[in-house]
Amino acid sequence: MKQIVMCFVIVLSLISTSCITQKDVVYLQDKGTVINDSLQLQALASPYRVQVNDILSISIKSTDSELKKLVEIFQPTEQSAGTSGNGNLYFSGFTVDLHGNIEFPILDKVNVLGYTTEEIEDKVRAALLDKYLKDVSKIFITVKLAGLRYTVTGEVGGGGVLTLYQDRVNIIEALANAGDITDTGDRKDVLVIRQYPNGQKIHHIDLTDVAALKSPYYYIQPNDMILVKPLKRKALGAGQTATQTFTTIASIFSVLVSTYFLAKNL
């Protein structure tokens, strides 16, 4: 019987540490990593620089009636029937090719690789002024990414390849759009796989710490992959709550006792 009690104590110790606590599931806790009573943190969000395979939406408008016909030449093709949102932009937008160029009407190829959308606006404006227009003061150019496309997988409510039509999206918003992290997901070590000109890099961010607001990975970028690992507790097969854990312990203890008496009576 002593062996059973010892086994029970060991199982109890293992499972008692396997309950998912509030600290495991609450976002942006004050862990003393930030010395600021008001917790007014400035999140880091560096300007995004265009990559290969990005799709750009470029709009050129003019208030000058004489320039409107010329401006129409630069507009993308009309929307394809049966397409909408990002699907339509796939056909009517400007895709960055493997050399970092976009094919722009009349202007031919324009290199946009590594530039911000504001810088691309300046490049298009300068090209128009150089080749076709004497004055671009009445020309309004807008360059935007055709949605922020990213991938979420792992311990989330509903992962997949997702698109949000916003200029800035933080990682918590991105995860919420994917059904949020489940109770068995590891919020303390979320992986962000980010694209760079020389390849991909894996970054880590602790979303349970308010210091995450200062992380350069708090705001996601197009083509980011977000991976949520399962908690080690999940591998033990224990309950997520105290009630579930108690039920698991009681079941294991019942099996141990039954096994002991069966073996004793043989």
Image (tube, helix red, strand yellow):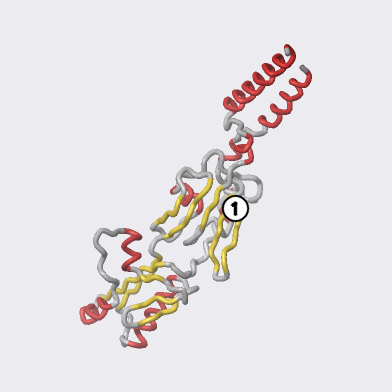
* Image side of residue 42 versus residue 87, left or right: right
Q: Position of residue 43 (x, y in %)?
A: 54, 57
Q: Quadrant of residue 9?
A: top right
The residue at 42%/61% (across/down) is 167
Q: Give the structural element (helix, strand or loop) at label 1.
A: strand
* Image side of residue 119 versus residue 254, left or right: left
Q: Position of residue 239 (x, y in %)?
A: 59, 30
- In the image, farthest residue toward the front: 266
Specify the quadrant that holds the C terminus: top right
Name the residue that disc number 1 marks.
205
Q: What crowding class fits label 1: few (fewer than 14 Cα within 10 Å), some (14-19), or many (20 or more)?
A: many
186 w.r.t. 42: above or below: above
Q: Quadrant of residue 20?
A: top right
* Image side of residue 106 versus residue 213, left or right: left
The residue at 23%/78% (across/down) is 68
263 w.r.t. 173: above or below: above
Which is nearer the eye, 160 or 33? 160
Q: Position of residue 220 (x, y in %)?
A: 50, 58
Which is nearer the eye, 78 or 44? 78
* Image side of residue 80 versus residue 56, left or right: left
The residue at 44%/78% (across/down) is 111
The type of residue carrying mark 1 is Ile
- In the image, farthest residue toward the top: 265
Q: Quadrant of residue 82?
A: bottom left
Which is nearer the eye, 210 or 159? 159
- In the image, farthest residue toward the right: 2
Specify the quadrant that holds the N terminus: top right
